Amino acid sequence: MHPKPHHHGHHHKPPHASFAASKVLDFVDEPRLDVLLASLVPDAADRAFVLRCVIGEGPLHHRGANYILLTLLAQAAQQGKSAGFPAMAGGVAVPMRLPPYLAESVDEGNYPLQLPTGALLALAGGDQARLAAMIDCLTDGPSQHALANVIMVALIERLLAKTQP
């Protein structure tokens, strides 16, 4: 990435906050996250695409934040599990809203993982309209946000399932 000479965006940071990308994202361990997400997205090519969206695209702070949150949640969801996770009860397809250069690498109109809706439906008090609004909020926006949200909800649902009798 080349440095931007002018700052027209909404993020105003002091000059000392501009580090080289390699330095900022030094802590991102893609192979580790790849292993943690294997049970959510079993196909290796699909998983590589998902990883590219969540930690390879967009502003550096989003990539780093996605890596941190997804890795910690995946670790938490795996604790006490000998192998893998239970199959998820219900889920909805997540429609892609991709920039053209990313859309070229995928055929389908949906991401290769589903948004589980069990915990969301409970949060919505069983109200389908509220559930639909929640799904819209979670799946709208750039791929790095939508996919990170979907993965986080999937991992949180697994955590909730483990804490319930």
Image (tube, rainbow, N blue to C red):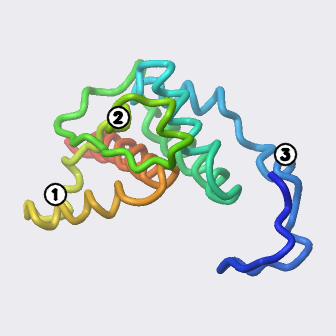
Q: Earlier in the sequence, mark 1 or mark 2?
A: 2
Label tally: 3
Query: Which numbered marker is on residue 22?
Result: 3
Residue 58 % position (x, y): 62, 54
| Residue that badge 2 annotates | 113
Query: Which numbered marker is on residue 156?
Result: none
> Residue at the location (50% across, 19% down)?
44
Quadrant for the C terminus in the image: top left
Residue nearer the viewer, 108 or 55:
108
| Residue that badge 1 annotates | 122
> In the image, is residue 105 above or below residue 60?
above
**Marks 3 and 2, Cα distance to the nearest angstrom?**
29 Å
For label 2, count other residues whose C-alpha is less than 10 Å away and answer few (under 14), some (14-19) or many (20+). many
Residue 52 shown left or right of residue 64 in the figure: left
Q: Are marks 1 and 2 in contact (CB under 8 Å)?
A: no
Query: Which amino acid type is shown beneath numbered disc 2?
Result: Leu
**Marks 3 and 1, Cα distance to the nearest angstrom?**
41 Å
